[in-house]
Amino acid sequence: MNILNFEKQHVKEAATLALANYNEERCFVKELPPISAIPDLSGFAENGLGVAAFEGEKMTGFLCCSKPFDNVFRSTDVKGVFSPMGAHAAVSENRSKVYAAMYQAAGAKWVQSGAVSHAICLYAHDEEPQRQFFNYGFGLRCLDAIRPMEFIDCKPCTDYDFVELPKTEYHFVYPLHLALNRHYCESPFFMNRRPETQEEFMMASMQEGVRYFVAKQGGKLCAFLKISPSGEAFVATGNSYRHITGAYCLPEHRGKSVYQNLLNFVISRLKEDGYTRLGVIFESFNPTGRGFWLKYFSDYTHSVVRRIDERITQRI
């Protein structure tokens, strides 16, 4: 096996391989939309951080990533890289060995670039690469999941009101946004993100074009769902898709089917607007959220992360 730098002449063959891997996942997750092509990979050839594996003249895999970025997961002081869905793939034969060799070469580049956090978005049902990356010290971090825009079965909540907030009332979500940040700091999350000011929260909401759907009891807001035009995966976008990027319910209102009813309200509104698929991304170490989302959504990606010992950068 030869490991080469990923370059522009590899893009076409890599895209074919990546599309084949995507269609493998579609065999397990029927909700994923059919696609005819992977997003353009040329940018990954330009940043010099990718590799390609060959057996003779045949490409057996490729592994690319984003440019290094600061403030990984918005809760650390380190620089990291991310290999998103579609930015890597491998043939089915000896897939784990192909990924092992590719990461050994690509990881060296990533560390040399100053990135000590390495994240790779793998397909949920492609278990062979996941086992290989676990052997390399990676752990599960985030999951993408999807569902058709169909109602879920739940008992009604007659003493709650469900509404979509107009933009002029987005500030009412801010206290729950802060409560969600505090929740992230607790065990087993340990995610100390800098809380946004209310002005920053409002500005980001407007710039991202999000919509807020809330549950109220007695006129007081007790839960919200933040709906965005897109997510991190390349299928998490488009005119038929919307994505959940924020969710929180006050503890005293949990276990009463409030969130199931709020989700159904969101589905009814989005369905009226012509959307056919709803997605969500969540942390694997969120025990309550993981149980809820996987009950109603089908996971199709598992993002794994490795935190390199920072002092190794003193040796390069």
Image (cartoon, grey):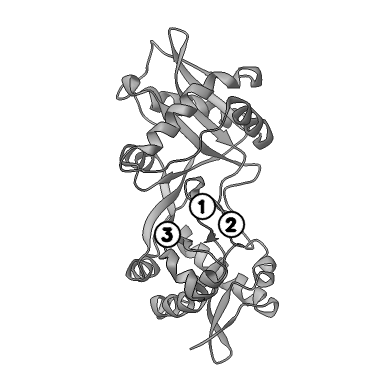
Three-letter residue code for mark 1:
Val
Residue 149 appears in the picture as rendered: no
Q: Nearer the viewer, residue 181 or 142?
A: 181
Residues under labels 2 and 1: Cα distance?
7 Å
Kindly check if marks 2 and 1 are in contact, taking CB atoms under 8 A apart as contact: yes
Give me the residue at 56% from left, 50% from top. 232
Q: Position of residue 235 (x, y in %)?
A: 57, 52
**Labels in figure, total:** 3
Identify residue for label 1. Answer: 72
First of labels 3, 1 by sequence position? 1
SS for callout 1? helix
Identify residue for label 2. Answer: 69
Residues under labels 3 and 1: Cα distance?
11 Å
Q: Among all residues in the image, which is located at the extreme bottom?
A: 56
Using the image, tell me which numbered label, if any, was put on residue 305.
3
Decide: is 7 above or below 165.
below
